[in-house]
Amino acid sequence: MTALVLPGADDTAPERTGRLRRELRAVHALVHRDLLRLACQRVPTALMLLHPVLYLFILGGGLAALIPTASLGVGYRTYLFPGMLMMTVQTPAIMVGIRLITDRQSGYLRELLMAPVGRTTLLLGGCAGGTLVATVQGAVLLALAGTVGLPYDPVLLAMLLGGMALASFALTALSLALAVGLRSPETFHTLLGLVMMPLLFLSGGFFPLTSLPGWAQALAAANPLAYGVDVLRRSIALRVPDGAAAGSVEWAGRQPPLLLEAGLLLALGILALLWAARRFGRPE
Amino acid sequence: MKLHARDHEPARTAAAAPRTGPDDAGLAISTRGLVKSYRGPDGTTTDAVRGLDLDVRRGETFAFLGPNGAGKSTTIAMLCALARPTSGRATVAGADVLAEPERVRRRVGLLFQHSALDPDLTAEQNLRVHARLYGLRRAEVRRRTAEVLDLADLSDRRRSLVRTLSGGMRRRLEIARQLLHSPGVLFLDEPTTGLDPHARARVWEHLHTLRDRHGSTLFVTTHYLDEAEHCDRLAIIDRGRLVAQGTPRGVRAEIGDDRVVLRTGDDAEARRVLGPLVPPDRSVAVDTDGLWLRLPDGSAWIPRLCAALEVHGIAVHSASATPPTLDDVFFHHTGRSLAGPERTGGGR
């Protein structure tokens, strides 16, 4: 057996590796950790997935009869589907922030900080892991597309998956940016409880934003979830005949282009991540 | 000519020492004038560490002893390049903590006082994530994980979730995790705190194996005196300053005196008899336990003391000489006891 602790440590194997490769391996380590956790926490994951499904079938089932298709452009369950996908990716994305705080409390974060990689790398790893896990969970619920009358069109599914990945990234980055400055999970939970309800109801996932009063529409135009829902909804409209639904985000009465909305989500995620990295990078 | 050469020799060695001079080759850790000050919210500065000169040789187990708040953890944080020294310099495993912090972190392992594993993952998964985090190749990750699990005697529990392991097993797993990237120096901050005596013994057995079989350099902080006794060398820190450094035997010999206790038929009379016999600066005290003396090489004194008492017809019931403990050393240098209120004056 080789010496476990090298007496000289002159050229340990990791040192021969290039810097970028080391940082990438660290990102991989954190993504790997997230996937392992996902794999071994089957019950919580299943429950997490059940939540949006209940919304889809109970809320959707109940309201489908009341809301005429004419007012939305599509059946209510079809209308609800993008919002439900957004709810699905939102929970695991937010968990990333909660885990940053619990990792800090348990001391695991200190172990991570001890690793010979940049702090930004650790944050990137957390963000990549969260985005992947959220997207995977969203992909599982894509299987329900048929039950709301959507075709299993590969291009549509790929577009929805891409939209969910984008929204997951933005939400994970926002969640990290929020968690970086907080010390207690309680504060984070309280803050989320306060913020999530309006974000969700102003996302256009449950009812058309155009039916809201003007001030609420203005708020919705600043809601990242609304852009996430919109990207998904308009992907459906692009691929499904008669799939166009009413009432999405409007800027001064006009719909921003789909690509601009996607770009906004991406930019928001990058900005949040940069901001988080700046605060996280400060030595203690 | 010869004289000339000798003149130059020490100067050259001294100049080369900070980098990779011959003096450096045998040292795993070397610090000079290491200081860490924290600026408080009210603008005042607190000195946590005030000028440490430490030398730790390769392959030795070095104990860093001191009461809580003495600056042990701050020192470790600086040596592991987690905190920047306010002044002074330190070389750890051949890398400078100020100039090459990431290289230092690659070459050291650090077991935190309150270490953390991911309780939802298995022992093996925890190790693999960590190995990857330190940039090991996939093949190395597998090989090293198996090796350190074997070393920690946890191979049969490798698929157990960490939450199901006992405290002692977790500690061994945490130590194993720090060995994955083959660090040149392993720092252990209070490795046995919170463990029961049996688990403590297992951890130390494990650490001694590392030293004896693999030549590891271990830097261990502790406030357990008996643990420091097992180490090759030690340093005692108090209020940010070193008060003693050397082998356990060496630092004890520094204060020199053994504690001699005699129980006689008439302690008061015995004290009168022995008073002139011992060196004038040595005290003789009497309490309910008997007669107390502080003497260098105490066991050699016992026959002489007994003989003198016999001449005066005083019966000696028992005699003992105890070498100074590390607590005595600490008390000698600081006027306080390391063990705190547990130490009882008469009993020890």
Image (tube, coloured by chain):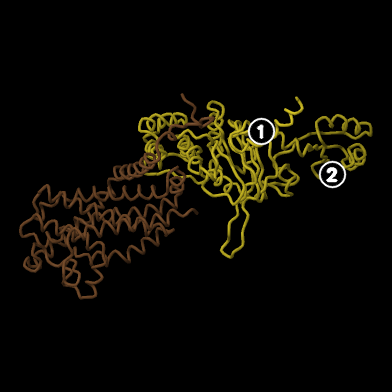
Chain colours: A brown, B yellow
Circle nearer the N terminus (1, 2): 1
Q: Amino acid at mark 1?
A: Thr
Residue B342 is situated, as x and y percent measured from the top left of the image, at 67, 47
Query: Which label was assigned to residue B124?
Result: none
Judge from the rendering whether residue A112 lies leftward or rightward of residue B55; answer left or right.
Answer: left
Residue A81, relative to residue A43: is it above or below?
Answer: below
Instruction: Return the residue nearer the eye: B308 or B145.
Output: B145
Determine which quarter of the picture holds residue A221. Answer: bottom left
Residue visible at 64% across and 32% down in the picture: B23
Q: Which residue is mark 2?
A: B285
Residue visible at 47% across and 44% down in the picture: A114
Residue A46 is situated, as x and y percent measured from the top left of the image, at 24, 49
Q: Which residue is mark 1?
A: B13
Instruction: Return the residue nearer the eye: A122 or B254.
Output: A122
Q: Amino acid at mark 2?
A: Ala
**Which secondary structure lies at badge 2?**
strand
Residue A254, relative to residue B26: is it above or below?
Answer: below
Residue A192, relative to residue B23: is it above or below?
Answer: below
**Chain to which the residue tagged by mark 2 belongs:** B
Determine which quarter of the picture holds residue B159. Answer: top left
**Chain to which the residue tagged by mark 1 belongs:** B
